[in-house]
Image (cartoon, rainbow, N blue to C red):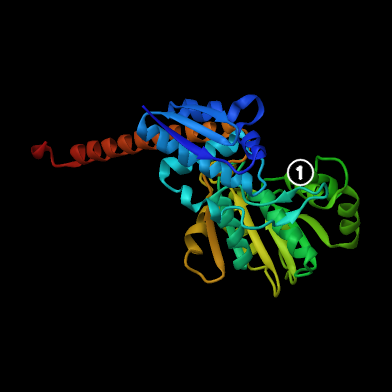
Amino acid sequence: MIEQVVNVERIEQIINLFGSFDENIKLLEKEYNVHIINRDTELRISGDAEDVMHAQQAIESLLALAARGEQISVQNVHYIISLVREGQQDKLDQMGKGVICVTVRGKPVKAKTLGQQSYIDAIQNNIVTVGVGPAGTGKTYLAVASAVAAFRRKEINRIILTRPAVEAGEKLGFLPGDLQNKVDPYLRPLYDALFDMFGPEAYHRYLERGNIEVAPLAYMRGRTLDDAFIILDEAQNTTPEQMKMFLTRIGFGSKAVITGDVTQIDLPNGKTSGLKEACAVLQGIDDIAIQYLDHRDVVRHELVAKIIQAYDKHDKAKQSREARKKEFKIKKDQYYNRPQGNR
């Protein structure tokens, strides 16, 4: 057993680190099997040498976040634990390098994980960015935040939101209202993000002026979109033809962000996802970035990350079983197709 002391500059950082009802510290103690106590501006960590070392690395990383004004949550603790486990805690200073934009309520929007920071950097440095990852990784929200930031800097004149909602086999005609009313349910995540950034009044004003446009993907055909920030959401449900059509709409002074989750494809069986094909076709092209996010980048309830991991494990096991069945069938067919005398 050893004891290690971590000195903290301000008592406020310790309060932030401990969290509500000491939940953050309890999580660290459970993860690393150590005991952590506070003495004024000192934290004393006791336990086995290796466990204490890892706990110290996690605490120092969390204190670095607190020093930058971050509110430490259980989610932060889980993420830092994963970074320490992978030996990547030194990369923490790359995360949240700057505020993308500020919401109407004054809340700064910035990266909460290294994957999100790479995604934001890709959007800023490329004309087309493809963000692929599971639910809760901030793909859509960060894309909208980047669009609003570009609009406020007057780098673009319009924000265009689209999603594969009206297409062969997809009919919205039974829904009441005009086109706007029909696509509203499909684009609600994008609306929610825009409401956060602009506020309802400014949002409706920009919508009336044409600075914000919401349209089904099928309505993009034949258009050239100049000086616009275009977001294609739920791109896993596009066909290859739709994806090609969308990519060729981009005009001068425009940026495009394509988001999707290849584990949630709703296309009929046998249909190829345009997102999957685009990730293969667009590799290595200048000004196009493909950014993958995973369960470590989930910024919703920590249970979401566990659910995603569980489904990934299930899918891999299923694929392995199917591969073994296929291999067995091939060998069986080869055996029965051989000349009778060779059996």
Residue located 89% across and 54% down the image: 202
Q: Nearer the viewer, residue 269 or 246?
A: 246
The location of residue 206, given as percent across then percent down, is 87, 58
| Residue 327: x %, y % from top left | 28, 39
**Front in this rendered view, residue 5 or 303:** 5
Q: Is residue 268 visible?
A: no
Does residue 264 appear to the left or right of 217 in the view shown? Answer: left
Q: Which residue lies most toward the front here?
A: 40
What residue is shown with label 1?
188
Q: Is residue 238 above or below residue 244?
A: above
**Quadrant in which the C terminus appears:** top left
Left or right: 281 as drawn, with respect to 182:
left
Q: Is residue 77 above or below residue 238?
A: above
Q: Secondary structure at mark 1?
A: helix
Question: Is 203 positioned to the left or the right of 293 in the image?
Answer: right
Q: Could one spot residue 161 in this view of the protein?
A: yes
Q: Residue at 60% of width from left, 46% of height from top?
A: 65
Q: Residue furthest left?
A: 341
Left or right side of 338 for 12: right
- Where residue 131 sits, quadrant-wise, is bottom right
Residue 247's spot in the image, x, y percent?
62, 65
Amino acid type of the residue tagged 1 in the rendering: Arg
Q: In the picture, which quadrant includes the N terminus? A: top left
Which of 162 and 36 lies nearest the eye of the viewer?
36
**Could you say where residue 41 lies in the image, as x and y percent from the top left?**
59, 36
The image quadrant that residue 254 belongs to is bottom right
Placement of 19 over or under 337, stated as above or below: above
Residue sitting nearer the eye, 81 or 212: 81
